[in-house]
Amino acid sequence: MTILGRFGTGNIPNLTRIPFRVPLITETSETEAQWVGEGKGKPLTKFTVGRNEITPLKIAAIAVQTMELIRDSSPSSDVLLRNSLAKAIAKRSDISFIDPTSAAVGGVRPASILNGVTAVTNSDATGADGVREDVQALIGAFVAANNPLQSGVWIMGATYALRLMMMLNPLGQREFPGITMQGGTFFELPVIVSNYLGDYVALVNAEDVYLADEGGVDIAMSTEASLEMADNPTQDSGASTPVDAELVSMFQTNSVAFRAERTMNWARRRASAVAWMDNITWGDPVVTP
């Protein structure tokens, strides 16, 4: 299951689901309240907002097989290909959602929820003590930004989930018994584990992340399409001047084109809705000179 698919399941709080093209108000500064004495004037507070809109963006992939391959294969190659395309969509959505280096491209893809957010500084400690100090710093930054812990979700890579599972105290007991390869809990907050995270970990306020999604991967096939057989096609239906391209007819070549796509988009409600740490060393092997 994808990172996005895990939100709203089990004990994991859901993202804030919204429709496409609906004007959104984003909070750029918070209000404050004060105690007021009897007969005294109540103070005013500033509230700054921004305006945003979630437009539909899509992840897509196309692959081609010959009719002969589909007829003569077992298990059926078309089923394998459809599953492979769906997995490719899931992988791309996970990476784009959480990779801090994934910046927005206008009209093409959204920025990662970590993109543009300064990472929390790592601890110098090692072992389980280093993990605890890093977690304290992450939760401290998360809470300082007025994020409710009941909406907090850890997102980490499978390698680091395994390392945390294998950390033992001097009595041979697990240091962090709540975490599993399926997620579990880490310092009493739910965990989402993904194969597509590197050496970083994030603590996300789920309710402060907007998600618009048409709902699942759409698979279509055609035996009559003509395709530009390239992974960097030059075709653009919006271009003022047509671009020459060599096309291959699926009908003429006895081929079948399979297309998978998912329409979705996301955005942070507040830039401070996430806290993350880069270059973590949790459970790294000790190197002896």
Image (cartoon, rainbow, N blue to C red):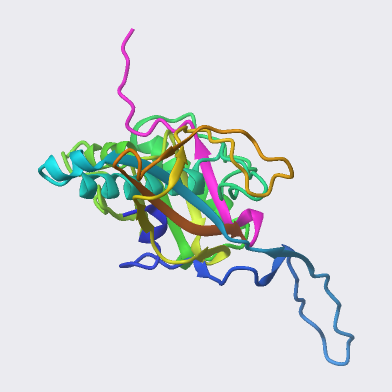
Q: How many marks?
A: 0
Quadrant of the drawing holding the C terminus: top left
The answer to which of 67 and 46 lies nearer the viewer is 67
User: Could one spot residue 168 in this view of the protein?
Assistant: no
Q: Quadrant of residue 100?
A: top right
The answer to which of 185 and 173 lies nearer the viewer is 185
Q: Is residue 117 left or right of residue 152?
A: right
Quadrant of the drawing holding the N terminus: bottom left
Q: Is residue 166 left or right of residue 144?
A: left
- Give the image location of residue 146, x and y in percent: 61, 63
Considering only vertical position in the picture, is 204 above or below 253?
A: below
- Is 169 part of what is drawn in magenta? no
The answer to which of 175 and 138 lies nearer the viewer is 138
Residue at (28% x, 40% y) in the render: 65
Query: Magenta: predominant secondary structure element?
Result: loop
- Is 272 part of what is drawn in magenta? yes
- Range of residues picked out in magenta: 269-289
Residue at (25% x, 37% y) in the render: 167
Q: Which residue extends farthest front?
A: 252
Considering only vertical position in the picture, is 27 above or below 57?
A: below
